[in-house]
Image (cartoon, rainbow, N blue to C red):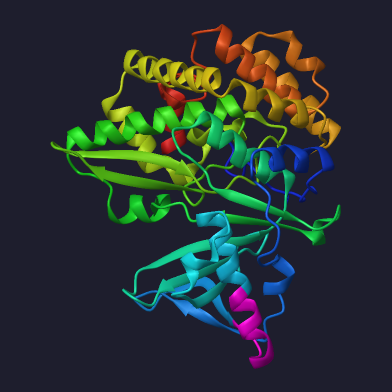
Amino acid sequence: MEPRRNLISKKKPAYPISEHLVGYLGHYDRTARGGVSYDDLARYAGQVPLYDDFGTDTLWSTVYYGHSEQAEIHDALRTTYALLKSAGDLSTVEHLYIDRVDLCLYGNTLPFRVRIVNRLNENFDYFYVKRADASRVYGLELEHILSPNSINFLARVDGPELRDQTILEEHIVGLPGDAFMRDQLPDNRFDEVRLAKEFVKFNERCFVRLLGDMHAGNWVVDITPDFEKLHYRMRAIDFDQQSHHPRKQVYLPQFFPPNNPVIKLGLEHLTETTVDQYQREERALMAGRLRVGGQRYDELMGVMREDLIAPRAYVRGLGHGLAAHYGEPAFRDAMTMGDLVSLSLDLLMARAEPASLKLLSGGTAADVARHVG
């Protein structure tokens, strides 16, 4: 099937963090008391465009605050960093200062990015302050449980309304996918094969746990040198489209044209047999993580299956698509997106067959050739 160019055409609404989800987060030390809120940072007095080292507009703006508010906001940001990094131990941030607060102008949720600097050695770090969205919270938790990556975030919930809720997130290190493919795509066969393998595994993870919208701007590449060559790991950085959209293609990174440079490497270097091997490896690893984190996962699913994070029509649409894909009628009876995630992961534990599509395609090699053009 020829994939469509625009998989997501409507802006996704944010969903408030429910009382039951707050209870789950509190049990696993994912809630914050104090620190900064999104509305605190939204009281900026002005903004200026932020350019990179080459003079290119980053589409972020650096915001500034009035003299009477700046000290209070900066103190709250240092407290937030202490909550994220050291369980609120303020002695760890006495020598830190806030260098910059940036506002993302192209994201749907307009997140803030904070640059914090150690005045003793000028080392710096980033963290993010975002409007709350239950979809994102479920996405972050599932990433922490199911992927090879630990995720550190906190939710500040001062009330049941979205305006009273904030997500505080640690920075995820890596080179943005679009910049990586533009500037650092490998040019030797060994590294190309490694990168293609990682994309197959990333594609499988996203589809099994129903994380959508993984185009090249929503994942990063973490590059680690080993004793021979380089090791690549693809990491999701945007979790707003966790289990929301009704079309199954949205949950397959292979269908997003911005990912084509990596998909082409898979077509050049991987066979059906090796793709199947890598998919099975990833499914086995995910199943192992589920067994280790079974209680936490069961508690999360108990909340997610009762939560409404997508219209009923979206649940039905995705349920029918997954039922046809897996040959499993139970997907059609799902009432919530949490039900669909739970069914997908039940199949992960019960079946060895790869979940995503063969040859990184909608079917045949010819379909892929048309896709990547």
Q: Is residue 258 left or right of residue 326?
A: left
Q: Split into 4 quadrants, where in the image is the N terminus? A: top right
Q: Quadrant of the C terminus?
A: top left
Say above or below: 105 vs 283: below
Q: Nearer the viewer, residue 311 or 27?
A: 27
Q: Position of residue 160 (x, y in %)?
A: 86, 52
| Magenta segment boundaries in residue numbering | 64-75
Which residue is at the front of the view, 83 or 63?
A: 83
On screen, residue 208 above or below 137: above
Q: Is residue 66 magenta?
A: yes
Please count the marks in the image. Answer: 0
Residue 278 is inside the magenta segment? no
Kindly identify the residue that appears in the image at 67 percent across and 44 percent down: 137
In this view, 219 is above or below 127: above
The location of residue 105, given as percent across then percent down, is 60, 69
Give the residue drawn at x 52%, y 21%: 292
